[in-house]
Image (cartoon, rainbow, N blue to C red):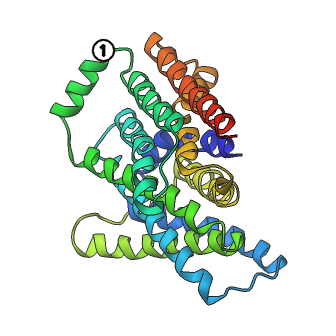
Amino acid sequence: MLFVVVLFWSATFVIVKEALTDSSSMLFIAIRFSIAAVLLIPYLIYKKVRFIKKEFLPGFFLGVILFGGFAAQTVGLQFTSATRSGFLTGTSVVMIPIIQTVLERRKPSKGAVIGSLMIIVGILFMSSGGDSIFTFLEKLGENFNVGDALTLVCAFLFALYVVYLDYVSHENDFLQLLFLQIAVSAALGFGASYLFESAGLEIVKFNLTGNLIFALIYTSVFATLITTALMTKYQKFVSPTKAGIIYSFEPVFAAFIAFFAINEKITMFGFIGSLLIFSGLIIAEYLEGMLKRNER
């Protein structure tokens, strides 16, 4: 099910970047999460969900981390390219094992670590656009800007979210966690929109164009409600590091969607990167299975 999450995420970089021409970033996030929360309410009523105090803090903290990641990425997209944003967001795959070790005091398997390193190299190949990976890194270093820095913050917060979700999802109600994190993100979005305008950091705008309507529908339903639900429900069945490896398939899915939908050519570097990402998952699975057999 986590691969479905990746499939829905794969188109969001370009969709959100285009949507920001018609809406200010924080307001877009606020409305995106608000729509998702409103759509979830009828189901909560149907299931007769009762919110209890002990569930509030985990859901609240998940919402804060989730909003922080989306906010950093969305604002960052205004200053950097979708390609650079995709690569820098993908660095979360190497942050997750570190955060997992620190917070959960549980070391990831050797297979997961090796697989994660292979995947980050694969993402680097896919992000190079067919040029030398060293040229891509050189350009990234020379032209590193505030958008890139914010995207790295996004990567860290996303890695933190994956590990914290693993920590709280085992002992807390799924629907309560789901609604609370979405609702908190929506509220923080409206608050940030007001603060950004008051501080002169962003002019609030909202031009309801066809492009913006499509972006809000796609991101609120598919890339927020459904993906957050699937992550909250099913991520607990795998380790945070393995979940990060699965989420790293986003650029692969995006490349193949672009190939079939708009006939965008996949470069040789793109194929190599895809192969490395697939190999990273296979190696992680194989080595982990081998270690478990040896333990027996």
**x 36%, y 72%: residue:** 192
Specify the quadrant of the image occupied by residue 33. bottom right
Is residue 5 shown above or below 64? above
Specify the quadrant of the image occupied by residue 220. bottom right
Locate residue 180 relative to residue 68 in the image: left or right.
Answer: right
- Residue placed under numbered mark 1 in the picture: 132
**x 68%, y 43%: residue:** 4
Label 1: state its secondary structure.
Answer: loop
* Residue type (three-letter) at the residue carrying disc 1: Ser
Direction top: furthest residue? 268
State whether residue 243 appears in this view: yes
- How far across and how far down the image is residue 152, in percent? 32, 48
Quarter placement of the C terminus: top right
Locate residue 40 relative to residue 101 in the image: left or right.
Answer: right
**Of the pair 70 and 277, the residue shown nearer to us:** 277
Is residue 30 shown above or below 12? below
Q: How dense is the environment of label 1, judged by Cα within 10 Å: few (below 14), some, or many (20 and up)?
A: few
- How far across and how far down the image is residue 231, in percent? 63, 55
- How far across and how far down the image is residue 125, in percent? 40, 21
State whether residue 23 appears in this view: no
Direction right: furthest residue? 46
**Of the pair 243 and 8, the residue shown nearer to us:** 243
Locate residue 140 relative to residue 9 in the image: left or right.
Answer: left
**Of the pair 74 and 165, the residue shown nearer to us:** 165
Is residue 201 shown above or below 288? below
Q: How many marks?
A: 1
Direction bottom: furthest residue? 53
